[in-house]
Image (tube, coloured by chain):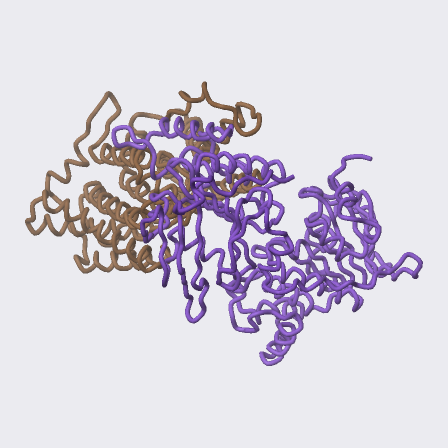
Amino acid sequence: MSATMTQARSMPADRPTSRVQTFMSRHGAMTPTFAAVVILVLLLVGAEAFLRGDFITARTLSALLLDNAYLLVLAVGLTFVILTGGIDLSVGSVMAFTGILGAQLVASGVPVGIAIPAMLAGGSAVGLLIGVLVQRFDVQPFIASLAGLFLARGLAFVVSLASIRVEQPEILWLQQNRIRLGEWYVTPTGILALAVVAGAAVVLHLTQFGRTVYAIGGNEQSARLMGLSVARTKVSVYVISGFCGGLAGLLLTAYSGAGYPRNGIGTELDAIAAVVIGGTLLTGGRGYVLGSLIGVLVFGTIKTIISFMGAEQSWMQIIVGALLLLFIVVQRAIVARSVRRR
Amino acid sequence: MSVAPRPVRDNDAMDGARPLLELTGATVRFGADAALDDVSFQMFPGEVHSLMGENGAGKSTLIKAITGALALDAGTLTLDGRRVDFATPHDAQRAGISSVYQEIELLPNLSVAENIMLGRGPRSRGAVSQRLMRARAREILAELGLEIDPASTLGTHSVAVQQLVAIARAISTDVRVLVLDEPTSSLDLDEVAELFRIIRELRSSGVAILFVSHFLDQVYEICDRVTVLRDGKFVGEYVTQELLRIDLVHKMLGRKMSDYKERHRASVDEPEAPVFLSARGVDSAPGIANADVDLGEGEVVGVAGLLGSGRTALARALTGVSHLDSGIIRIEGSAVSLDSPRRAISLGVVYSSENRLAEGILGHLSVLENITLAVQAQRGVFRRMRPARQRELAQSWVEALAIRPADLDRPAGTLSGGNQQKVLLARLLALAPRVLVLDEPTRGIDVGAKVEIQNLVGELADNGLSVMFISAELEEVLRVGDRVAILREGRIVETVPSSDMTVDSLLALVASPDE
């Protein structure tokens, strides 16, 4: 941001501090995200060395974004929720529900221009329900979103028990159209996912709403006393997460060419893992949506490396588990240090 | 050091002028109890006003009523002669009434600038501009004469700096009434001086400041007038400089202050009581180095020292809470290893933390459970006390220590600070200890309860218990302790009989770096 601009004419802090201390007192919260970037680079370079130059290619990297677009969108929505100190377990089910809903709608002849908004609205509605439970009825986010998880999964099965193929060119276009630059390509799904990241970054950093999200994660009571609209913001983050679930449903439907009610079982946990690896504290208040992008890329890279090596996919879970452990320890260390400094 | 007596209000404000803020006939009820009963309260521009009273007198209720955190059941609040009804603290802030609480109500994860400006920040084309917020925050901090980097994260600063930032936030709007609730409880002397400088500046610019503190010295130093409350009722409003301290205390207590019972003190020529616990060369980093202490049977050893002198570190080292780096602790002559609080308790050494809320009282559990918890833990899961026995035990302690209200089933968190402290003492005493280490047992509790606890410590010692009594209040240390151990920078510099000391001579020992 504009930190480097103001650095030159900054005043001394309350005690004489070195440049490093000044930097840490301003940007210390970025450390876990930096760590995620380092891990991503290590993974890419390591895989490249191990696989003798077959890994870092335009094809694999382009596919990385394409394969993980839906996960990225889910992770962005979850970042909002986790920054307030909440959690949303429903996103995987919401993605399945909206996916099958959209597939059913277009299969029964509803125009795409209505089906897509219906998917987004369906996701947002589940999010709204969770948000109201959390805010108005003071239900633990874990429980409220668990209810949302079951509800959305059930609704998905109500829509259809079996997979429904999607043949509408407007939806498949999202996936199949490739904007090429040499060997590199990007699909509209990838562009949408990146736009969601960019939009979220702008909202979180440059709007009153976004700063309120951080404020709630810092101390909800203080945020309320500061006159920030805590209630509205808390409901909104779940609506955003639900909306992202709906959008992810669209992206996944385009990606797989079908809606399937069993999609995304456990995907909410992948998304949470990506957000945490990206440096967002589960206790809220600290983290960056760009970190979640990195987290998703780390996640996707591990998956790709494992399929390149032809190893069992269960190794994926072991490695992600180990990384999560590492990150939670790093975060604990950071929190412990900031407590000690006080 | 006191401020020269000054006219309380400007002459033109004095007569017929209307108060800036006025509360008339204010009543707030919680169930059947009136927390505030027909109270009147006035503040004029450019004054520092103090609100005094014991715990439970209605101070916090009054503050909540004027800051919009609580609605009045009866009575009116006027600001500038106009009746106001605040639905939320934010409404009160918009009307110019801001408050800074003891527990800092800010956002540790955001920058200093955002903490000052958020919710009212400058926008550029609808966006929250970090750059403009920083510039504005820098101006506000500069007005207060503070040099704090507005871009730094709030949580990286000390509590004192965070408190000053909270004040900067409060005054960044057009503040007219500033409420400071126990603002100095976690500040050291220099920081208090800095705070007072800022309060004086605000006063001269016409802000009305409500300064609530239980430090009488500070109230006398900074406040122009004082309103006294007792049991939710208005007792009176006085000019601070015309009110003797002893009278103020009387008005707060509403009775003759029950004098501290003089204990019989061992004189020098009497044979010394046998030493129960002795510590030699105790090192426990960080905080305490090479400490020698003896606790005789039936003796109270007071511990005096400034904040950070190692008071708490010493207490924790002796009670198995923190690890000993070196040194030896003997109980009745034989060396023991106090490697955990559990082990210490089994040897009869118990500790009460200075941090009553975080390391003592379990607020949501009942008084009964809070008292019987430690005994039960000591007995183990398989020797569970029968409920009737628990009740009997807890009841006997509630009576012995006069815990009020004497309701065993009430959540302990709803008791006043003094009574919570008594519940903690009851928990420890139920363990039938031989050594009681009390770290700041009277901090933040009202004067009446303070005297009760001091007397209780004396009685316990008379019954043969060894007590280590740590307090930041030198007078209290001298009154309660038979001997006083003086700590400076992590070392016990001297242990002297308290009969040889006065507060002034003790102060000199605690403060002087070398003599």
Locate the N terminus of chain A by quadrant: top left
In the image shown, does B31 or A71 lie closer to the viewer? B31
The residue lying at 63 percent from left, 52 percent from top is B245
Image coordinates of residue B290 in percent, x first then y, are 80, 43
Image coordinates of residue A173 in percent, x first then y, are 14, 36
In the image shown, does B357 or A234 lie closer to the viewer? B357
In the image shown, does A211 or A295 lie closer to the viewer? A211
In the image shown, does A121 or B143 lie closer to the viewer? B143
- In the rendered structure, the answer to whether residue B509 lies left or right of residue B214 reads right
Q: In the current view of this chain or complex, which residue is farthest to the top? A: A8
Q: Colour of chain B?
A: purple
Residue A44 location, quadrant: top left
Please count the marks in the image: 0
Residue A71 location, quadrant: top left
Image coordinates of residue A185 in percent, x first then y, are 24, 27
Residue A83 seen in this snapshot: no
Image coordinates of residue A94 in percent, x first then y, are 25, 51
Depicted B249 relative to depicted A283: above or below: below
Q: Colour of chain A?
A: brown
Residue B439 seen in this snapshot: yes
- In the rendered structure, the answer to whether residue A266 lies left or right of residue B425 reads left
